[in-house]
Image (spheres, rainbow, N blue to C red):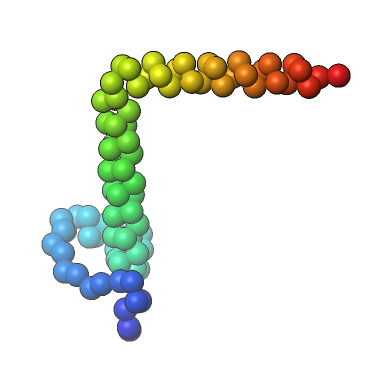
Amino acid sequence: MANAPNKRRVSVTIDADLLDAIDQFSDNRSAVIEAALRLWRAQQIQAQLRQFYQDRPQSDIQEEETWAQETQDAALQHWDDESP
């Protein structure tokens, strides 16, 4: 079986119980491990994003709140002006 162009063959060592669980639910170890790695990657990105927002300076937060309020007020005023 030829590898897909964007895939690489690797060798990993994993816990025997995990491998047994994979084999119990799937006949495609590679697909399960790839799905698990995609989930892990998404969790890492979410953690980085969460950390970014938690570490923002108070001045940035205040600026964003001010911008949001001004934008909302302008949109509501525009809608009121456009009403029949």
17 versus 50 height, above or below: below
Dividing the picture into quadrants, the one containing residue 60 is top left
Q: Classify the position of the C terminus by image quarter.
A: top right
Taking the spot 73% from the left edge, 21% from the top edge, the residue there is 79
Q: Camera-side residue: 38 or 31?
A: 38
Dividing the picture into quadrants, the one containing residue 34 is bottom left
Taking the spot 33% from the left edge, 71% from the top edge, the residue there is 6
Q: Locate residue 50, reporting x and y percent.
A: 31, 31
Q: How many marks?
A: 0
Instruction: Residue at the far bottom: name it.
Output: 1
Q: Camera-side residue: 39 or 84?
A: 84
Taking the spot 30% from the left edge, 66% from the top edge, the residue there is 30
Q: Is residue 64 left or right of residue 35?
A: right
Q: Locate residue 28, reporting x and y percent.
A: 34, 68
Q: Classify the position of the N terminus by image quarter.
A: bottom left
Instruction: Residue at the far right: name it.
Output: 84
Q: Is residue 82 left or right of residue 40?
A: right
Q: Camera-side residue: 30 or 44?
A: 44
Q: Camera-side residue: 20 or 49?
A: 49
Q: Locate residue 54, reporting x and y percent.
A: 29, 25
Taking the spot 28% from the left edge, 38% from the top edge, the residue there is 48
Q: Locate residue 15, reporting x and y percent.
A: 15, 56
